[in-house]
Amino acid sequence: MTERHVYAQDPNAPERKAVTVPALRAMKQAKTRITMLTAYDASFAAKLEAAGIDVALVGDSLGMVVQGHGSTLPVTVEHMVYHTAAVSRGLKSTLLVADLPFMSDRDVATAMATATRLVAEGGAAMVKIEGAGHICEVISALADRAIPVCAHLGLTPQSVHKFGGYRVQGKGEEAAARLLADAHAVQKAGADMLVLECVPSALAAGITAELEIPVIGIGAGADCDGQVLVVYDMLGLTAGKRPRFSKDFLAGRDSVAAAIEAYIKDVRSGAFPAPEHSF
Ligand code: KIV
């Protein structure tokens, strides 16, 4: 028994082929929608694995939904490594992505050191980085060293103060053109995947059609190559008002497993997100 076969893994989880970076690109080409949810601990990770989710994201949203902060900004590299390693112990075939937290991508050297820890200590197969501009240099350096990168554009929560709140991005011609240019720039820099958060559906559809890499939406409409949600939102656990782009998949079902399975089914079929979850 290896260290990876530990307490949280579900012995009844179906055997699957490991989800890899090339496999995600093949899914885009085959028009098979990619399913992704956040996870922050081994037990939830094991539920995602057992349901057959493609990608688990250790998001810095843990600063809000696990730690109770008002933003993702207080999350540290240490927190991310801790939670990534915990999630890794619950997974077998699901691809594990981990966020570079606030300012850990401020320059190439710092981003490289952080990504190294998330991959080597945390067990991540890919790291996610918010933004474009100077971040393209970071993406390119990581890609050159064979660390897969998921870019993140649109509503990038680490820029909450700059945006003046959690607002839909890419509205209006100029903002849409900028977002499209940024999407091309992160792909050119070497990103293997892109998360688009809270952008108008038509813009997200256009970006998805133009890019070769898979585009995963959250509040970005149904025409992306896949969808991601914060797992606590889609289980109705998040305090306060549920974000418009989310849906409580536990409502009317009797288990976490059933909710995750319903999410996977609805994403794969295109039933989620519906127009009321989009902008
Ligand atoms: O931190 C996070 O959970 C994320 C997702 C919302 C995409 O970035």
Image (spheres, helix red, strand yellow):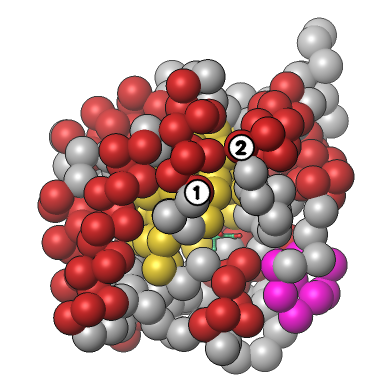
Would residue 92 appear left or right of 72 to someone viewing this image?
left
- Note whether residue 89 is visible: no
Q: Quadrant of residue 96?
A: top right
Cα distance between the residues tagged 2 and 1? 9 Å
Q: Which residue is mark 2?
A: 108
What x and y, as percent, mark residue 192?
38, 35
- The quadrant the C terminus occupies is bottom left
Magenta span contains residue 68 = yes
Judged left or right of residue 4, residue 51 is left
Q: Nearer the viewer, residue 242 or 144?
A: 144
Disc 2 secondary structure class = helix
* Left or right side of 28 for 129: right
Residue at x 50%, y 63% (from the top left corner) = 229
**Can see residue 114?**
yes
Magenta stretch, residue numbers: 63-72
Q: Can you say whether 88 is above or below 218 in the image? A: above
Q: Position of residue 74 (x, y in %)?
A: 81, 66
Query: In this picture, is 275 found above or below 52?
Result: below
